[in-house]
Image (cartoon, rainbow, N blue to C red):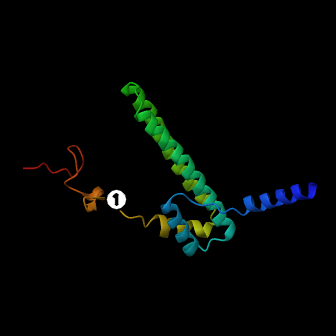
Amino acid sequence: MLKIQALIFVLFLSLTMSKEIKCQSAADEKLLVKMTTELSLDSAQIYSLKKVFSSFDFQLDSINALIKTVQTSDQPEEDISKKSSVLFQERKDLSNWKANQIAINLTAVQKKKYHTEIVAKTRPILHFGHDKADCKVCLKPGDSGYVPKP
């Protein structure tokens, strides 16, 4: 009987230890694939980054659920605003944590290449088919470069 319990325990450990960590986000999966090919990540780095992405996704889902709960509550608008701003800051802090964890898991050469070739090549935010940062139509009064409509 003791041998069977030991065998079951060993099987349980082998299944849990070999379980693949998956990223919930498709964007994180794409980023990891790109990083793996362009930065030549080793298996330990890939495993660590998958853990970071998985943890980030779980925490982000939790914060987003809290934001939704707060914003749909029957509390006064002022309380909702205060609580939401705290949660939005937590979400920003979480994104910064993710970026720091990515940097920690890379070598100095990989960090340089990551920042110059992977992060720097993010596409501009498109707004009605154009770059919102350079849009003259989207500017508001008080913005530099604002041209009043005739």
Relative to 137, 93 lies left or right:
right
Front in this rendered view, residue 145 or 19: 19
Question: Could you say where residue 101 lies in the image, as x and y percent from the top left?
Answer: 60, 55
**Kind of residue sitting beneath label 1:** Ile
Q: Which residue is pictured at 53% across the width and 64% down the height?
A: 29
Q: Residue furthest front?
A: 1
Q: Position of residue 111 (x, y in %)?
A: 57, 65
On screen, residue 40 versus residue 8, left or right, reads left
**In the image: residue 15, left or right of residue 120:** right
Residue that carries the numbered disc 1 in the rendered image: 125
Vertical relation: 70 (above or below) 141: above
Query: In this orientation, which residue lies closer to the viewer: 95 or 53?
Result: 53
Crowding around mark 1 (Cα neighbors within 10 Å: few <14, some 14 to 19, many 20+) is: few
The percent coordinates of residue 60 (x first, y second) are: 52, 47
Where residue 86 appears, as percent x and y from the top left, is 48, 35
SS of the residue at dot 1? loop
Looking at the image, which is closer to me, 74 or 30? 74
Residue ranking furthest to the right? 2
**In the figure, is residue 113 to the left or right of 106?**
left
Q: Residue at x 43, y 30 (%)?
A: 82
Q: Residue at x 74, y 61 (%)?
A: 15
Furthest-top residue in this view: 76
